[in-house]
Amino acid sequence: MTLTATSFDWVRQLVHRESAIVLAPGKEYLVEARLLPIAQKMGLPGVHELVEQVRLRPDLSTNRRIVEALTTNETSWFRDGDPFTALTSTVMPALLAARGPSERLQIWSAACSSGQEPYTIAMLLSDALPGAASRVSITATDLSREMVERTRAGRFSQLEVNRGLPAPMLVRHFTRAGNEWEIAPALRRMVTASECNLAGPLPRLGTFDVVYLRNVLIYFDLRTKQDILRRVRQLMRPDGWLFLGAAETTLGVDDTWERVVVGRSSAYRPVRGA
Amino acid sequence: MRALVIDDSRAMRRIVGGILEGFGYEVVPAGHGREALDVMEGGFVPDLACVDWNMPVMDGLQYVSAVRSNPAWRSVTLMMVTTESEHGQIVKALAAGAHEYVIKPFTADAIRDKLALLGLLPEEVTA
């Protein structure tokens, strides 16, 4: 049986309550596609039956799987490459000049999915600024426990390494591990992964020089976007840099950020005194 | 943009060629490396060649080496598209002069990502 309006509405409310992400009307296809594998694994004939089961017999573990399935997004290496080029060409040189020689630099990949973004940053720094890479810690967070565990493992399927990872980087930084590819231990040590719901109060993850918060805000309503940007700013150095997704901006959302052009990309920096 | 799709599998030539045509490429197929060199010597010098590894008559690695040894073809970007997935094989192809490497099976998005890396995705597709 296909998804009824009542079932869809129940899923929408669950996802909004647990993650603040808004599933707009018309996203029924997404719910069907993402939840069908869960229904099948549980031996149920379809998504409608899955939703009916958890509605009538609440089960936190299944709720979590539903939320994760609907909030985990496709990712690739060097996704929209310009924010990464900007890191090594402009942002890191500026930060290295501004910081003391022994000061550590902290970068936050705030919706790391299965780890492609934090390891892209680690590879870039290791290749372009090998002297500075040892001073950098990368914090990777995601709403999904499964994605955090995958990031910690640093292992990627053949299909995943095909997605935007330059072949010279694949052979330089990965080894084959059965059917998968495993990131070099030195790069894995640069990355610390943990669960974090951006829509709720943030744990004290660090004080960040650079934050990658890309393709996240698009899923939230205006109020939640403002809350997230405010909380992120509280975890940043006053001269820090924030990178958003290509379709995202702070303009019209939160005027305590200044947009700056960095190469072919845009970054946002806290307005002084705001 | 012009592309050569070199693979001994007709189905694979159709798949890769179809993806590239979707990005606006003019595509010419070839069943092995020697046939591809003949096409190029005949005047069709592509911007991109997608090259299978294991083929009769002339394999992909021999083709890559042949293209790289001719300065007139310096502008051709070479991308292996193959089932060969060992670390050492990828190193060997890059050392011979391949610019990129896609391991079969792949998705259209994988080809798109690689073309973007190589700067070979037309602007209207990037936007």
Image (cartoon, coloured by chain):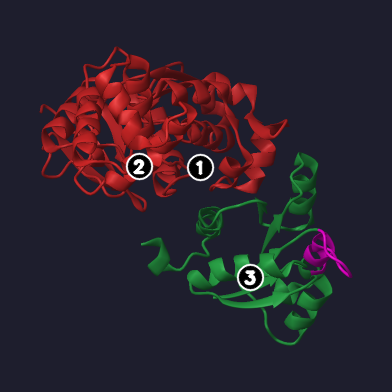
Chain colours: A red, B green
x and y, in percent, of residue A203 in the image: 29, 13
- Which residues fall within the magenta stretch? B54-66
x and y, in percent, of residue A188 in the image: 57, 23
Q: Nearer the viewer, mark 1 or mark 2?
A: 2
Q: Residue at x 66, y 33 (%)?
A: A180
The amino acid at mark 3 is Arg
Which residue does the numbered mark 2 point to in the structure image? A32
Secondary structure under the numbered disc 1 in the rendered image: loop
Instruction: For marks 3 and 1, give the CA distance.
Output: 27 Å
Q: Residue at x 12, y 37 (%)?
A: A222
Which residue does the numbered mark 1 point to in the structure image? A77
Which residue lies most toward the bottom here?
Answer: B42
Q: Name the residue nearer the viewer: A180 or A39.
A: A39
In which quadrant of the rendered image does the C terminus of chain A lie? top left
x and y, in percent, of residue A258 in the image: 18, 40
Q: Can residue A206 be seen in this view?
A: no
Secondary structure under the numbered disc 3 in the rendered image: helix
User: Dividing the picture into quarters, in which one does residue A107 lie?
Assistant: top left
The amino acid at mark 1 is Trp
Q: Name the residue nearer the viewer: A58 or A191.
A: A58
- In the rendered image, the vertical position of residue A126 relative to residue A202, given as above or below: below
Instruction: For marks 3 and 2, give the CA distance.
Output: 31 Å
Q: Name the residue nearer the viewer: A198 or A265.
A: A198
Which residue does the numbered mark 3 point to in the structure image? B14
Comes first in the chain, label 1 or label 2 = 2
Secondary structure under the numbered disc 2 in the rendered image: helix
